[in-house]
Image: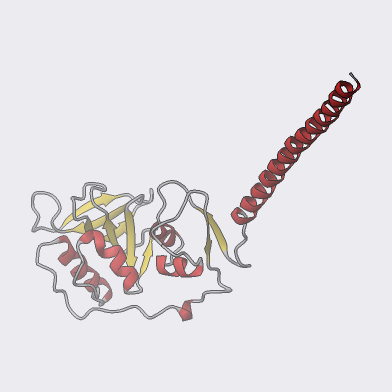
């Protein structure tokens, strides 16, 4: 009988210890989860709020953005932004990602490479590319330097490569580049030359290969917006 009592007392004692240990483990796990969540949130917040250098501007990526579009908005190049922000793959940017736009303290006009210049207009006569190159030469006495891989929709990238200026803001005498299916352009895009900027922000541009009389110069109103850039030397 006394042995049974000793055994029962031993079982109750160890059962109480087991319950206490179990509760302690549960409490420890809960504390660790809370700490990890707080630390993770703090780390994510710290990364998200990583400041740009003094004098820079900060751009927060939104849906539909590309590095080229951001660069055009700030009159710089996607190569500059990719290098400055140490982007391993310039084609991969994410919503809410912070892109640092170099300020005057880090990038000056003197440090930019000189723009490349062309020597002739070798585009096929009657194409929009021929007219844009020819009209730009008439206005500025400068030929565009890109002749290969230069369908109309590619002119924006070719301009970046040649260190020309690309902007989303129109100016008289600039080349307007429409991406495919934008404002009536077909699958190869369209280029023309801005003759006049209207008070509403739209432009009147001279074109060839636009409409049924493709061999004639026509004047068409276009609006700045997505898929539209303006190129100048």
- The answer to whether residue 75 of the structure is visible from this angle is yes
Residue appearing at x 19%, y 62% in the figure: 151
Residue lying farthest right? 2
Which quarter of the picture shows residue 72?
bottom left
How is the structure coloured here?
secondary structure
In the displayed structure image, the side of residue 112 where residue 160 appears, left or right: left
Q: Position of residue 229 (x, y in %)?
A: 33, 58
Looking at the picture, does residue 199 appear above or below residue 154?
above
Residue 4 in the image: above or below residue 119: above
Residue 198 position in % (x across, y down): 34, 52
Considering depth in this image, is 88 or 226 the residue closer to the camera?
Answer: 88
Q: Residue at x 47, y 51 (%)?
A: 94
Counting from the top left corner in percent of width and height, residue 66 is at: 40, 55
x then y, percent, for residue 120? 17, 78
Total number of numbered labels?
A: 0
Left or right: where 178 falls relative to 69: left
**Is residue 173 among what the camera can see?**
no
Q: Residue at x 89, y 21 (%)?
A: 5
Q: Indicate whether 211 appears above or below 175.
A: above
In the rendered image, which quarter is residue 122 located in? Answer: bottom left
Q: Quadrant of residue 216?
A: bottom left
Of the 4 image quadrants, the one containing the C terminus is bottom left
- Nearest to the observer: residue 187 or residue 142: 187
Image-based side of 19 in relation to 57, left or right: right
- Residue plotted at (73% across, 35% down): 26
Q: Residue furthest top?
A: 1
233 in relation to 187, above or below: below
In which quadrant will I find the N terminus? top right
């Amino acid at each position: 009988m006394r042995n049974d009592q000793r055994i029962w007392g031993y079982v109750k004692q160890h059962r109480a210890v087991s319950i206490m240990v179990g509760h302690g483990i549960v409490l420890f796990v809960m504390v660790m989860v809370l700490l990890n969540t707080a630390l993770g949130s703090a780390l994510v917040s710290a990364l998200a709020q990583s400041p740009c250098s003094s004098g820079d501007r900060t751009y927060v990526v939104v849906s539909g953005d590309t590095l080229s579009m951001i660069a055009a908005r700030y009159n710089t190049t996607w190569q500059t932004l990719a290098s400055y922000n140490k982007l391993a793959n310039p084609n991969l940017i994410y919503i809410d990602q912070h892109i640092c736009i170099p300020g005057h303290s880090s990038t000056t006009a003197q440090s930019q490479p000189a723009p490349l210049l062309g020597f002739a207009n070798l585009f096929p006569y009657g194409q929009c590319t021929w007219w844009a190159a020819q009209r730009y030469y008439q206005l500025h006495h400068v030929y565009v330097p890109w002749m290969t891989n230069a369908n109309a929709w590619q002119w924006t990238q070719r301009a970046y490569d040649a260190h020309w200026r690309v902007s989303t803001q129109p100016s008289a005498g600039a080349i307007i580049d429409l991406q495919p299916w934008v404002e009536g352009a077909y699958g190869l895009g369209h280029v023309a030359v801005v003759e006049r900027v209207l008070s509403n922000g739209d432009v009147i541009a001279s074109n060839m290969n636009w409409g049924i009389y493709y061999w004639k110069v026509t004047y068409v109103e276009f609006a700045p917006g997505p898929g539209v850039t303006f190129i100048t030397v």
